[in-house]
Amino acid sequence: MVIEAIAELPLTSDVDSDDLRNFFEDLVEFNGANYFVARCGVYPEKRFVRYFEAESAGKIKDAQYLTNVLKSEFNIAAEENNVAILDARNGSDFDFEKKSTRRLVFCGGPRDSFLAEQERLLGCGLYPERMELSTITTLGGVSDYARFHDITTPILCFEVTSQSASIFIINRGQVEVARPVPFGLDSIYPLLQRELGLKDEDSARKLFFSNTFDFAEMGPKLLRRMTKELQASTGFYEVQTGQTISHVFLSVLPKNLNWVSKTVADSLALEILQPSLEGWLESLKIKVSEDVELMNLGGRWMGLFSLMGEFHLREEVTSDE
């Protein structure tokens, strides 16, 4: 695979399907076709990623047991959602027939949400030959990147979006924590409005995403609720496992919100994982055109490049049971 060009289009409220179609047509020759075949990563509403450790490997061979776990432990109805069950050690599909681990990752989202994402893609001229949950794709990329760079200590991954956030801890390619946070960036705007005396929350939101204000000093106060959640999760993990988390990785956020990563890292005394992409992509047999500049791309691009990786071709882990 060769990356010949990269481009981005901010999905502001005034961007419609025609704008998206025009954006893609500037990149790719449709040659009169209605659709361009694509591999797509999506963030459907109410998506979920949950870690579960069973009492024994024998129990999880019963599909009904896992359905009951979804409902009783995580309040997720299997009949209303697209659900994938992964081996938490390496992200491979869980196989009921094979002897395997007790540690699983449930991931997915409401069927209606995935359908809405698919229709949105079709509406702007993309035919998704493969549609992936970007949260999982990115975790796979971070895990493989850590393997490539021989990072052997646990990594805290934090995905924060408008209405919710998720906390993950990965260690040597294994997911060891995956839990939701029931609030996201929207929870910051009322506080910012009060702090600066702004007229409404919409004004606070616009200022938050602008490049006109330095949040370095105010950042710890604005993010205090989030950092407390992160401190609780990391503290419990380190006491439980005896291991020390070394890095933090934040996905999704645009470059003008880099102060969020710095504030979180400083609050937790962790090093920000800043991916150096070129060598890692080469290890995945992905070449980069001379016209593509990777140097200044932040962690937010990890999800996109992870869509290109075939991580399952790496050496598989052995069973720990």
Image (cartoon, rainbow, N blue to C red):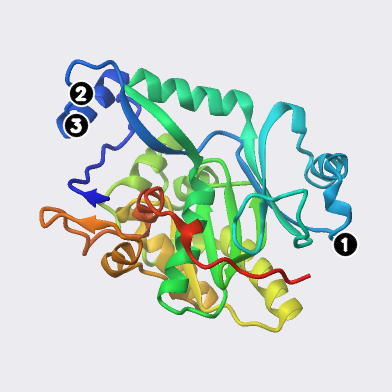
The reply to whether discs 1 and 2 touch (Cβ–Cβ < 8 Å) is no
- Secondary structure, mark 2, is loop
Q: Amino acid at mark 1?
A: Ser
Residue 200 in sight in this render:
no
- Secondary structure, mark 1, is loop
Classify residue 108 by image quadrant: top right
- Asked if 96 appears above or below 169 in the picture, the reply is above
Q: CA distance from mark 3 to mark 2?
A: 6 Å
- Secondary structure, mark 3, is loop
Between 49 and 256, the residue placed more toward the observer is 49
- Asked if 242 appears above or below 25 in the picture, the reply is below
Q: Residue at x 22, y 50 (%)?
A: 3
Q: Amino acid at mark 3?
A: Val
User: Which x, y percent locates residue 194?
Assistant: 48, 48
Residue 4 in sight in this render:
yes
User: Which x, y percent locates residue 157?
Assistant: 53, 62
Q: Residues within 10 Å of mark 2 (few under 14, many from 20)?
A: some
Residue carrying label 2: 30
